[in-house]
Image: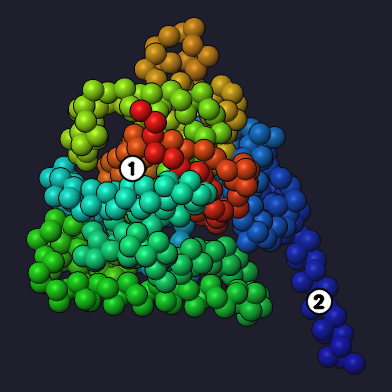
Amino acid sequence: MVSSLIAQAALAFCLLYYLYSIIHAVYFHSLRSIPGPKWWIAFPVLRHISAIRGQVDLDIPRFHLKYGPIVRFGRDEVSFIDPEAWKDIYGHNNKHHQLPKVKNSASNPLDIVSSNDADHSRYRKSLSHAFSAKGLQAQEPYVNNYVEQLLARLKEVAQFQTPTDMSKWYELTTFDIVGDLAFGEPFGGLASSEYHDTVKTIFESIKLFPFVKMRDAFPVLFSFISLMIPKRLLEAQKQQNAHTRAAVMKRLVNSSAYNRGDFMDSMTRNRGEKDGLTDDELVANANILIVAGSETTATLLAGVTYLLLQNPETYRKVVMEVRSVEQPESDIAYTSSAAKIPYTYMWACIQEAFRLYPPVPTGLQRVTLDSMLIAGHEIPPGTKVSVHPLGASWSPVNFHAPERFLPERWLPEARTDPASPFFHDKRDVVQPFSVGPRNCIGRNLAYIEMRLILSRLLWNFDLELCEQSSAWHDQKAYTAWEKPPLMCRLTLRKN
């Protein structure tokens, strides 16, 4: 009898405390003045359910449309879409070197993404040679080799004019490139026309992130939430880590692959010295390079292809630009190509694709250590803050006709002509490679690959979007996009 009363009292106390926490979060919290969806603030589990369903990064732009440029979408989570917020959140500030990243239990402190500031600087320094101008030039023959392989395979496909998945071809190409630059050998995707098992596991393991965040948010329910995680996702992550370790170890004993100027060569330059990377650090950073150096580039290429084919007049303009130059196709080359053939309109198309379809659509969260101003708003300590790429890019506050694919907004005259409808566009809010000391080190390589692959594709082929991919943009997002096949019909260009 007594134990029953104690249990009832304990349950009543828990319910009252939970009710108190809801009332406090909505009406008395230090973030209460920031607008946002009250249901999500009162019941944080809704935010995590949305993430597991692949919808959270589509919900947040809708919240910004409803509530404005600053949105509180959780009890301690705030999203911004103001250009000024980029430097406030991700740059240096007066009191602290930089705001610390929000980490989860799956974060690996040995990789360049989740490491502390000192180790991050060491990792970035170890990679700096590979991404320098000299390093990129050394990688030119490797990248060109796989672009030539891609074109050869697409010419085979074009002979039969059967629909083909361009998203898959882009992924096979970029994974082969990064596999060679990281391990000294490709994943073999272009040779086999199929994904390597490791690439398949990467696609699966990305979906694990929302479950990890939910588990961290509700540790009391840890065992139950762990049961919700599909076993295939856990197994995929294990397989990915195992393959990366095996590939790194193989590369380390393959002395003939050294002095190539690639990623691994750069990371092992100071091996055995004080600042040199350990085996575990090499494996952790190789894992990051494989995902960041391939999937993001392939995603942008798929996105810009879809957007061009959905807008025939824009597609016609960019094809005319690519094919109107007097130089031979061989001048559409790697590092030297920008000087020979500027391709201003194609560059604008790539930038507009970054705006409408950023490869990483989610906000990269940092946590405030003290009260600070972000985009003119005072934010208390302990708040998770981020700029949301989709929310910023899709907002009419930042762009004229934000829902339309209009590369003209990125042309020089749009910035200088007050009569242009795009004159007041806030282009600085589009930062696909982030800003500050933790921005993407592979930015230049990514731009080179995108520009080279797209220009060679448009030079050689006429493309048509197949009916089954007319709604290709309707996708879920799990930090990265879950892309369906992008079915296109290719024919060799008509003279």
In the image, taking residue 382 as reference, residue 467 lies left or right, namely right
Pick out the residue farthest to the right: 1
Numbered label tally: 2
Q: Which residue is mark 2?
A: 11
Element marked by disc 1 = helix
Using the numbered discs, state the Cα–Cα distance from disc 2 to disc 1 in whole angstroms: 62 Å
Element marked by disc 2 = helix
**Does residue 119 appear in this view?**
no
In the image, taking residue 23 as reference, residue 396 lies left or right, namely left
- The dot on residue 319 is none
| Residue 59 screen position, x and y as percent | 65, 46
Amino acid identity at mark 1:
Ile
Of 5 and 349, nearer the camera is 349
| Residue 420 screen position, x and y as percent | 49, 11
The residue at the point 46 percent across, 49 percent down is: 160
Q: Which residue is mark 1?
A: 453
